[in-house]
């Protein structure tokens, strides 16, 4: 049964090579060592024929399947036209799939010669996309990850494996246990989370983030609090207790920009200062939506008449957070 289903899936790959408008993927692909420990920076090592790439897919689309396969890098916005259909993996809960969505997915790399490519001289990589069985023509989850292919030289490296130890560690956030080697919680920009850790031998664990290969600081630890300082990438939290270590990866995401409504009341004719900055330090601009009741001068509210004043507050976006918008109601009373 499995061979039949995979054959259908491979044939469907060819039929689904047409493209439609591209949307931002919601699935998240994380490459790991064979132990499941995430690779620092989610960066693949140099690979050669026979090497096995191990990965997990977070936020897997409910009720759908996905393909994972080796291919030559396609043009921007297109799907690969040169790919290893015989080695394609079908990820699904359906009987006969290569792997289940919750599995460690393993894809064997080759030199491409068997499917008309030459990965030693062409840019090859790993393509991840929705399957055509449940999502024909839908390219919204298409992602391509280039690999560095080194012919005849096995240079595969992996994330540090936990030393052998009888001690075990656990970590949780807001009462929810974190799963080792699985990104189950998103860490948003400048949104601190407190990590509670334990060790089976009763010692107090320490925490730190694996340094990113780029040399950039993506996440920081402040006591037992962790925080992302950018909205893109992955961070790998390490929990240590003696020789025991647990790895807890996080995908990074945009923070939520907000601002505190500084008052709900003001006096007619009396200037009232409103919040000047958002939680991310952006200057808030204001506009009166009820000009007969109130007016705004920069962040100063002036009541013109008794009644309900509506002001629109806005702050600009950045790569780390979206624009802030809010309509605040402020009651203007008598002097």
Image (cartoon, rainbow, N blue to C red):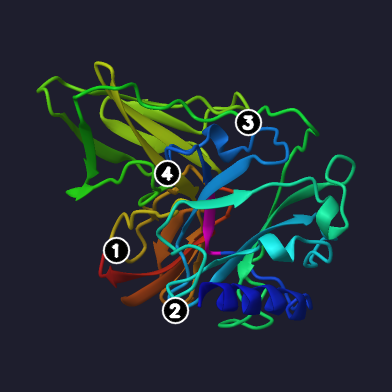
Q: Nearer the viewer, mark 4 or mark 1?
A: 4
Mark linked to residue 156: 3
Q: Position of residue 117 (x, y in %)?
A: 87, 53
Question: Cα distance, mark 4 to mark 3?
Answer: 23 Å
Question: Crowdedness of circle 3 by 10 Å Cα count: few (<14), some, many (20+)?
Answer: some
Report the residue marked by disc 1.
267
Mark 2 lies on residue: 63
Q: Which mark is residue 250?
A: 4
Q: Between tags 4 and 3, which lies in front?
A: 3
What's drawn in magenta, residue-wise?
Answer: 26-30
Are the two marked residues, 1 and 3, in contact with CB atoms closer than 8 angstroms? Answer: no
How far apart in space, not on screen, are marks 4 and 1 (Cα)?
Answer: 48 Å
Q: Is residue 118 above or below residue 13?
A: above
Q: Is residue 213 left or right of residue 247?
A: right
Foreground label between 2 and 3:
3
Asked if residue 90 is positioned above or below residue 124 in the image, the reply reads: below
Label whose residue precedes the other's in the sequence (1 or 3): 3
């Amino acid at each position: 049964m499995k061979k039949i289903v995979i054959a259908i899936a491979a044939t469907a790959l060819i039929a689904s090579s047409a493209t439609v408008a591209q949307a931002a993927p919601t699935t998240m692909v994380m490459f790991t060592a064979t132990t499941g420990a995430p690779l620092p920076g989610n960066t693949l090592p140099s690979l050669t024929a026979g090497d096995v790439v191990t990965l997990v897919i977070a936020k897997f689309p409910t009720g759908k399947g996905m393909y994972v396969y080796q291919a030559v890098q396609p043009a921007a916005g297109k799907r690969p036209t040169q790919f290893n259909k015989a080695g394609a993996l079908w990820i699904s809960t359906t009987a006969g799939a290569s792997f289940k969505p919750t599995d460690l997915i393993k894809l064997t790399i080759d030199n491409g010669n068997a499917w008309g490519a030459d990965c030693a001289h062409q840019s090859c990589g790993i393509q991840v996309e929705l399957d055509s069985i449940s999502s024909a023509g839908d390219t919204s989850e298409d992602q391509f990850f280039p690999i560095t292919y080194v012919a005849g030289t096995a240079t595969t490296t992996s994330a540090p494996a936990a030393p052998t130890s009888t001690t075990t560690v656990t970590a949780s956030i807001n009462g929810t246990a974190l799963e080792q080697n699985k990104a189950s919680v998103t860490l948003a920009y400048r949104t601190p989370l407190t990590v509670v850790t334990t060790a089976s031998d009763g010692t107090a664990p320490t925490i730190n983030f694996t340094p990113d290969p780029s040399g950039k600081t993506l996440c920081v630890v402040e006591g037992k609090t962790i925080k992302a300082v950018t909205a893109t990438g992955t961070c790998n939290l390490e929990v240590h207790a003696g020789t025991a270590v647990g790895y807890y990866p996080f995908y990074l995401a945009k923070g939520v920009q907000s601002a505190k409504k500084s008052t709900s009341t003001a006096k007619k004719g009396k200037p009232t200062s409103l919040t000047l900055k958002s939680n991310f330090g952006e200057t808030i601009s204001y506009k009166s939506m009820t000009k007969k009741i109130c007016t705004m001068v920069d962040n100063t509210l002036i009541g013109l008449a008794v009644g309900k004043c509506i002001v629109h507050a806005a702050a600009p976006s950045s790569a780390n957070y979206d624009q802030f918008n809010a309509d605040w109601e402020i009651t203007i009373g008598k002097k």
